Image (cartoon, rainbow, N blue to C red):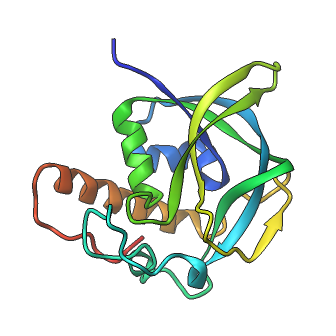
Amino acid sequence: MEQKILYFGYGANRDPKMMEWITGNKDLVGKPGILKGYALCIQRKDQVPDEVSITAPAPLSARQLLDNWPETFESYNIKKDSTGEVYGTVWVLTPQDRELVRDWELIDFGWYKDIATKVQTEEGQILEVQTEGMREDQQFDREVDGKNYETWLQPPEDFKRIATRSREEYFARIEGSTKTPEKVL
């Protein structure tokens, strides 16, 4: 039986369509969860790291990979905050699904960092999950209400197009292709 990973998705990643576009998996199972001890923030495009990370699978910065998004691009991110709460979805992922989400979130490109933490379900159950959040040295534009927030900061059709292409590029990279990711994220 394949290992399962509990992943906490916030922002667009709390939506089943978004997770399907990222992973290609139409059968993901998720339930509402609350991440305590974190605040939901919004980063502008100019606040996304522009240095090439030593872990980057291609010689591009996270911001360079966002070149085809408009200058008005904004994205959710989370940061530690003892009084904060972020509402989202706890997804049951395969290891491959999780790697596709990590790739989508540009973790190896230096934007987000991996976080292992706990969330609470509506029933009060505490679950150990993986998610991603802001690196310590990053700036953000503003904090927003982590309970009542818009899922989509950009048009969903853009997310679908770009997530699908990102997934294809991920598989090309891991299959040993020398193709460099296009600047579409």
Location of residue 106 by image quarter = bottom left
* Count of marks placed on residues: 0
Q: Nearer the viewer, residue 151 or 104?
A: 104
Q: Is residue 124 left or right of residue 67?
A: right
- Can the viewer see residue 168? yes
- Can the viewer see residue 147? no
User: Does residue 71 lie above or below 117 as drawn?
Assistant: below
Q: Position of residue 101 (x, y in %)?
A: 44, 48
Location of residue 32 by image quarter = top right
Q: Is residue 25 left or right of residue 148?
A: left
Q: Is residue 38 left or right of residue 97?
A: right
Which quadrant of the rendered structure holds the N terminus?
top left
User: Does residue 153 lie above or below 31 as drawn?
Assistant: below
Q: Nearer the viewer, residue 54 or 108?
A: 54
Q: Is residue 114 left or right of residue 54?
A: right
Which residue shows up at 62% across the image and 72% down it? 138
Which residue shows up at 58% across the image and 85% down it? 46
Q: Position of residue 156 (x, y in %)?
A: 57, 62
Q: Position of residue 122 (x, y in %)?
A: 81, 25
Which residue shows up at 53% across the image and 85% down it? 70
